[in-house]
Amino acid sequence: MTSRDKREDARIRDDKDDRDRRSYTVVDAVDIPVEKIERGKSWRHDRETFGVDFCRTAMIRRINVGPVRYDAPARDDFAGHLVRLNPFHVCTACGAASADGRPVFDHDTDALESAATRAPQLKHHRPWCPLRRAKKDGVTQEQVLLAHQLQTEALRILLPAATADVDARVHSFRAALRLGVDLHFGGDPQHLDTTVASMPDMDSGERRWFLVLFDSLPGGTGYLDRLTDRRAFRDTLARAYEQLKACPCAEEQRRACHRCLHRYTPEQFQDVVSRQAALSMLESLLFKGDNEDGWDISDVEHTGLVGLDAQVESDLEARFLTALRDWVKVTDDAALDEEGHASGHLRFTDGSDVMHWRLTAQRQLEGTRTDFTFTRVGGPVQSVHVYLEGFRFHASREHNLIAKNAAQRTRLRADGKIVFQITWADIDLFERRPGRTKPVWPPYRGTAQEQAKAAYEQYGGNRAHFGEAVFANPIDTLIAYLRDPDATRWVRRARALVTGLTAVSVTTAVAATGKRSELVAALREQLASFGAGRRHGKPVVPDASSLGPVHVFRTQDEHGLPIVFALDAAAPDNLRWTALTVLDDSDAVLDTDEHKLRWRSWLYWTNITQFLSLVGGDGVQLAVSSAADFEVEVLAVCGGLGELDSLAAALAPAPALVPEPTVRPAASEPSRDSPAEAALRKIIRDAVWDDDILEILREDPDEAPALLRLAETLAEHGKQAPVFGFELGSSRWQADFAWQTPDLKIAVVAAHQGDEDIEARRRDAAYAEDGWTVRTAAAWLDHLDTLLVQLPNTEGTTR
């Protein structure tokens, strides 16, 4: 190896510093073969996607893939990292190297002035290089990456991160672990280093992310063997947790600082790491419940056997919340105020009007758990439940829950809930990453779209507002509903969407009849045909004398999803539509690309057709496995109550008969009820108490015990549920509960925090000025008889 330079250029001087600093992209590739993992020293966390392997002969390769380029995005998948490859080019004749079109070592004053003048682009080549003499025969520029490899001992740590906020979570935990290692060893073991590695996971289709803690001295020094002890590793994490909790940057409203995470974080990730993200990950590993010890671990052969299913599902929720948060940042009339983990308040402002929703995560309802629930505040009692669906965990051969999911969603809708279903692909598209998938909207093309828009205008809507809410990503449709949940508009949109099917080229008329028996037979035949595997069912031929106002059609949308729909034109001014979307859930089609698209389309359709039930129609979500058994007689078009109302009636428990408290009237006071009426009284419990209010209050019963006791008492007495989290006026003075009718304004507010609580006094004055009667929960309990008399009872079911 040789070098050359002028003496004056090589001489060290302090009068100037004209070095050309360049940044390079460096990637670490970690090789830990399964057979090299030390037996008996691998373990996993029982509740979280987390585990540790130990290897004494790990291979760490550090690869320089060239100078950093900012003119194009990183798009090369290299060693599990997305980078921009920009190789070095080395001359095969003299070894001169260039990168990114420039010499690696560029001398402003070259030793051969004349050659530099003739060919400045070749001045870094050796004097005897054939290229200097314009002889190119046999001389090439080879592409080269620089690499250094180290064999040493390493801990490989599987991290609870698969898809969402990977950089923030991985590098926050990386810095936190390094902080804990320093505290554990009582110093700064500089020969210990960390790097990030990943590998594809065949089962989930995602990536496993590992943090690798290794010894930078060849062969290792034995330090890491101490951390293979499970209690020692827990102690390391616990020390990091305590240090992060005490860091002053929490009070300074900073994501992290030099006193906690920044000193252990590479420069390019300084703005990514988060003290709160690290604390959340550590808390999930160290604790469970009310700060109980959660370090539950067990042996495993190696961490590659730890499934990612739970993590991928959890990441889907995190991705949705992140997408919503990012959308709010660029939207002028929306605000999201978060409270802790995956909860908060979403508000839309239109002038002085505010549409306010309380957002909560993972609610258990009717044998199913929703991912997010939006509960309306300051308006009619209303809940919107959001399911985030991963194809593999809901509609694949491994997890075929298609029929079960349809039944669960239908049951919630029967209880008066609005249900939206959003997929992983929908979030990809909402985040403007269309290369990963293609949309399933609009569900039909050209003429059919124009038919739907014209129908929307005919039903009383503005056609310009139709496509943006209906022919859109389901997340956009959800946001449009939360912004304006006006039932009339959404009924028009659902009717118009189905109307568009009449102009689809493959739509076939099945029956036109006025007889209920023929209509039922036609619908049964169509549903049964899906199970039989026939493309078209045998049409029912009605008696010529029975041709009537009900028309039944069969079609499929752009992606081949079968749809049976019916039009009841008995009242021309109020056309009633019924739509039944049927998804094939047989093993023969599962996991095919066509099935994936139809599954997403199936969810898309029922997000919108659910509103048909509000105007005497039906929007039915079915799987082929259950279609033949569906009782079409319950449909409104067949003279039934409608699918949802029929199901609600079937599921409604018999009203409990509760004895009236024994009260002896005064001798002069006549009894207003008959003896039988005085003995028994029907109590109908408002489902909103249990579904929303009590569930939230019981999550932390010690926070507001009086409010919880008041809520339980009012629910037991059959009183109508209040608006939970009501806000008054432009100042948004908040009340815990509020009942508002033309003749009644009653609110429950939080107690004053001392005699000098000026904000509480202003709140009480604002409510009093607006005609409200306000007391704290404890005060209303003291005046319970008065409150029970004034509050309205629950009337019938909540739907």
Image: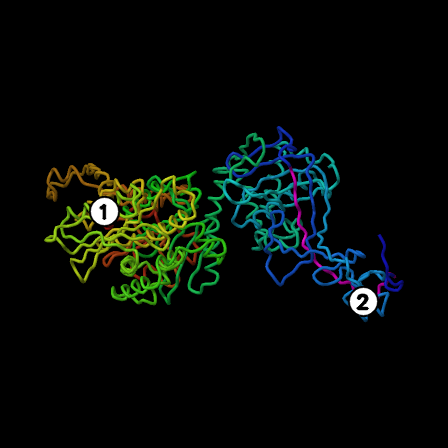
Q: Nearer the viewer, residue 618 or 725?
A: 618
Q: Nearer the viewer, mark 2 or mark 1?
A: 1
CA neighbours of label 1 inside 10 A, class few (<14), some (14 to 19), many (20+): few
**Badge 1 is on which residue?**
538
Is residue 679 positioned above or below 512 on the image? above
Residue 760 in sight here: yes
Q: Nearer the viewer, residue 656 or 211?
A: 211
Q: Position of residue 242 (x, y in %)?
A: 59, 42
Q: Position of residue 633 (x, y in %)?
A: 19, 45
Q: Position of residue 583 (x, y in %)?
A: 34, 46
- Dominant SS of magenta comes to loop
Q: Which mark is first along the chain, 1 or 2?
A: 2
Tell me which amino acid carries mark 1.
Lys
Tell me which amino acid carries mark 2.
Asp
Span highlighted in magenta in the image = 11-32
Q: Of helix, strand and loop, which one carries label 1?
A: loop
Q: Nearer the viewer, residue 363 or 337?
A: 363
Q: Which mark is residue 108?
A: 2
